[in-house]
Amino acid sequence: MSTALQISGPENLWVSCRAGEWDRPTPGICGEYVQTNLVVLPQADAFDFLRFCGRNPKPCPLIEATDPGDPEPKLTAPGADLRTDLPRYRVYRDGELVDEPTDVRDLWRDDLVAFLIGCSYSFEEALLAAGVPLRHIEAGTNVPMYRTKVACTPAGKFSGPLVVSMRPIPGALIPLAVTTTARVPQVHGAPVHVGSPESLGIDDLDSPDYGDNVEVRQGELPVFWACGVTPQEVALESAPEVMITHSPGHMFVTSMLNRELLAP
Amino acid sequence: MSTALQISGPENLWVSCRAGEWDRPTPGICGEYVQTNLVVLPQADAFDFLRFCGRNPKPCPLIEATDPGDPEPKLTAPGADLRTDLPRYRVYRDGELVDEPTDVRDLWRDDLVAFLIGCSYSFEEALLAAGVPLRHIEAGTNVPMYRTKVACTPAGKFSGPLVVSMRPIPGALIPLAVTTTARVPQVHGAPVHVGSPESLGIDDLDSPDYGDNVEVRQGELPVFWACGVTPQEVALESAPEVMITHSPGHMFVTSMLNRELLAP
């Protein structure tokens, strides 16, 4: 296994994944580069899903949708192969998880479309750089995520609830956290809610639906951002014949720099 | 007395004030135009005060400082006369309020410098336009304001605490309220704090130091912005030989449009 230090750029990471030398999570790996969620669906579902993303840009900020059958994300990671260059995948059939391989070459078809969807790792880098501490990163745990009672705008066969991630932020830093993330709408953008879990239909903040619980301390408020788990959840609920995603935490790393997200 | 409907633009308002026909408060008057706080000080104090504003841009966003002795704000209200064109003034001597006239021509001196400082009326117009309701406006009362334990950055003889205004905002609209006001740093900009009055040293949110109390309802949080009362308070505490300000609510209306504040 390679160590993080030996991964000097996304091309290196792609080659290591392709050769079976890297199958570990990607937080902190190639930290300057945009990491994305992956959702692969048959073309029969892709038009509905593309409209769903367009109608729900905060949870589903689309970075790239590939041409049907083409495993190369030509715009944001030219030279990469989405069938091999992620550390680990999940494969669902009719809405059920059936496999968690490191390579999906044998499953690839001429009618598959890959969706690369923005990921909070990019905005977390921006928050840390701005001086906003992030408890789950300090604790070395996963960010807590919650299904809400807020419905996404449906499109065709796709509909479902908004999923949010939560970060506790001191009151004096909330304005900075809002403005910093508002500048990167391609990776979820500004928060969707501040302060009242019950307004989102979250009954118990200490029991996240995904990820790990974190403490909200005196003077801090829970701040909620739209989460990239939403499109996966929604796609899964429609029980597509086949769906391929990244395995949680094992994201696709593009060759686009986080700072390019700030370009006017 | 003229009614609001007869005041069609700032030049009209200036003329009406000058003629003694308008001495009423200015909220909602010439609503598209930037209104400002006025602080007039002798040149001997002006350099310290100018540096104080520069060091504390959130409570003291300087729109214009006039040339000594010149009562015309040539940059933001050419043709206006700051000695006559506000509805009502306050005159302080050695830190004590001594008069509240509608005209200060007889007090004017060749060494007086006028400071026009951005006012929350401009950002409130932006918040309402963005769809953020403002309770004190709905209630027809003044915004509640509080002295905090946060010290401004001192400059020369000027030092003192930050004063903040508070508006209760529903959690789902806080991101919008932050990004909307962050776009207008010339009128206090983004909030300085969200959610915890005690972090600012405010013991009782229901007892504002200035203005009127407003209710914070379920699902809302108190959001605090730096307030233009700060520079007046700080100037007053230094007990200058003479200081002239606008009377509360009786602002100076420039010929600059609020939308010009959004220019890149």
Image: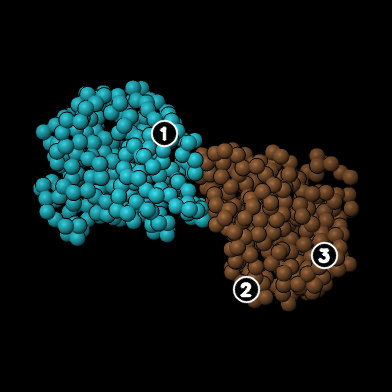
Chain colours: A brown, B cyan
Give me the residue at 11% from left, 47% from top. B20
Marks 3 & 1, CB-CB < 8 Å contact: no
Label 3 in the same subunit as label 1: no
Going from N to C along the chain, the mark reached first, 3 or 2, is: 3
Q: Chain of mark 2?
A: A
Residue A196 in view: yes
Which amino acid does the dot numbered 3 rest on? Answer: Leu
Q: Chain of mark 1?
A: B
Give me the residue at 69% from left, 42% from top. A137
Q: Pointer 3: what residue?
A: A97
- Mark 3 falls on what kind of element? strand
Q: Pointer 1: what residue?
A: B148
Q: Chain of mark 3?
A: A
Q: Pointer 2: what residue?
A: A155
> B97 above or below B219?
above
Query: Could you tell me residue B202's position as x and y percent?
Result: 43, 36
How many C-alpha atoms fall within 10 Å of the one at disc 3: few (<14), some, or many (≥20)? some
How many C-alpha atoms fall within 10 Å of the one at disc 2: few (<14), some, or many (≥20)? some
- Mark 2 falls on what kind of element? loop
> A206 above or below B70?
below
Give me the residue at 52% from left, 41% from top. A171
Which amino acid does the dot numbered 1 rest on? Answer: Thr
Cα distance between the residues tagged 2 and 1? 49 Å
Which amino acid does the dot numbered 2 rest on? Answer: Ala
Is A140 in front, or is B75?
Answer: A140
